[in-house]
Amino acid sequence: MNIRNNPSLDTNTTTGDAKQRTKRPITGRPEDERLSIGSSFAYGFQHVLTMYGGMIAVPLIIGQAAGLAPADIGILVTAALFMGGLATLIQTLGLPFFGSQLPLVQGVSFASVATMLSIVSSGGGLPAVFGAIIASAAIGLLIAPVFSKIVRFFPPVVTGTVITTIGLTLLPVAANWAMGGNSKAPTYGSTANIGLAAVTLVLVLVLSKVGSATLSRLSILLAMVGGTIVAVVTGMADFSKIADGPIAAFPTPFHLGAPTFELAAIVSMVIVVLVIMTETMADILAVGEIVGTKVDSKRIAAGLRADMVSSLVAPVFGSFPQTAFAQNVGLVAVTKIKSRYVVAAGGVILVLLGLLPVLGRVVAAVPTAVLGGAGIVLFGTVAASGIRTLAKVEYRNNMNLIIVAASLGFGMIPIVAPTFYDQFPSWFSTIFHSGISSAAVMAILLNLLFNHLKAGNSDNQSVFVAGTGRVVRAEDLHCLAEGDRFENGKLIDCDGNEVPIQSSEKASEH
């Protein structure tokens, strides 16, 4: 057991923090730690706030594109929350062969938006979308065990690159939120919106600095509450519509029509499912790295099965493909709350939000700019976690540096140039329009090329390698006597006396 990485044996835990941890993990896995019910739901609600905007965005976009009435769009939103909660419970608590048992929040995948819009606009409508999701998720469920076997091709040089890309890919989302979220609104990008995001960001940093471990770990939630209060005082938040609509409602199966199965739509959605599985596997590996727990192919397969079975059931209640939310991986890194039961509590909250639309309207009233201020820290932390993983990689006398460089560059193309792949075939743009999947594909292929298929490799293969090793010139060693040594940043001679170290410019003056 690694005592240093086991939070249950952390001797620096404060007394107040220790009181919240009512049960220690008996398995030795950090993610099995249990907190008190109150703390679990407080931290779980923080997860819900973090991903709520992204959760409801997809049903809003698809519902409007399909020309649905506001009431029917509301049903799509409710279904997304309900299914996200169920999927989260399956992923975190687990069933036999289903669920990675890691702190991962599930929700509707953004990777499916373009394809679903294409199916809707081609005349198939939502029934064709639902049918394509059911068929493609069934295929994904079958191939999950095989797909998970490639975990051995995800060493730190690959996982670190993908984790970094996840964080960098999400930062534009935070910036968009900070500007207001709606690019067509007259206040988009206003100093008021950005100022509100800045206030939230400052609150996160200040609360993270305080001496209380409890306040520090709730910094995101408390900063969002504080930012919302500021928004209410300044007239930037509107809670007047909370009472509109029913208080409670259960998602009705096939309320928006029975699914239809069209071959072209299914083929397109299968490609999306492969992208979703790639991103989910990256998220599983990322959160495993952050939590400090073992993630093998068996665990990845269980996580992918949870994704696919949730996606298979989602259309029954009027929802879309499910996947792990990368922004919540960042929240785990920020708060250092690694318990899967905390995220499961968030899943319970999502289910309740899906059954109680009035609660969903309360959360929806949180200004988008507030989410943006918190998102800058959250998503930046994901990138920082990836950089920390990359720091463990050996770069001497190998091609790891060029693997990282090319993969990061490839992953950033869709971010800096969103229309880059518009002229490519639809199947190609579907895969590589996501910076995460682009970086993952490139990193895996280059790792195979340089680190597994070693035929033709030589020492110091390129200029990228030549600049990464440490080199000491022979003439620099001539002044050293036998027994000289370097300790704590000081040069000590054989008699134990410190030898002054001067810059080359000063040395040349003497």
Image (spheres, grey):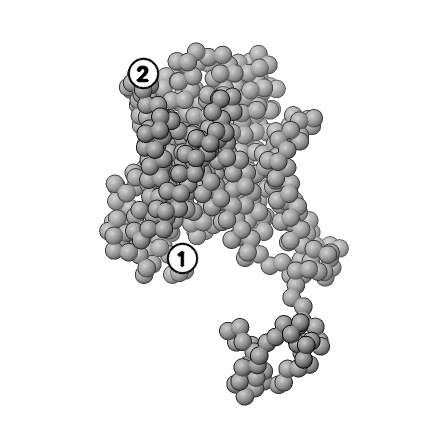
Residue, far right: 456
Q: Which mark is residue 244?
A: 2
**On the picture, is 369 further left or further right than 487?**
left
Residue, far bottom: 495
Q: Nearer the viewer, residue 48 or 491?
A: 491
Helix, strand or loop status at disc 2: loop
Residue at (64%, 53%) from the top-left corner? 401
Residue, far front: 509
In the rendered image, which quarter contains the C terminus? Answer: bottom right
Q: Is residue 264 above or below residue 453?
A: above
Residue at (32%, 15%) from the top-left corner? 245
Q: Quadrant of residue 93?
A: top left
Mark 2 or mark 1: name the one nearer the start of the chain.
Answer: 1
Q: Quadrant of residue 377?
A: top left
Please give the count of numbered marks on the rendered protein.
2
Residues at circles 2 and 1 in contact by the CB criterion of under 8 Å: no
Q: Is residue 337 visible?
A: no
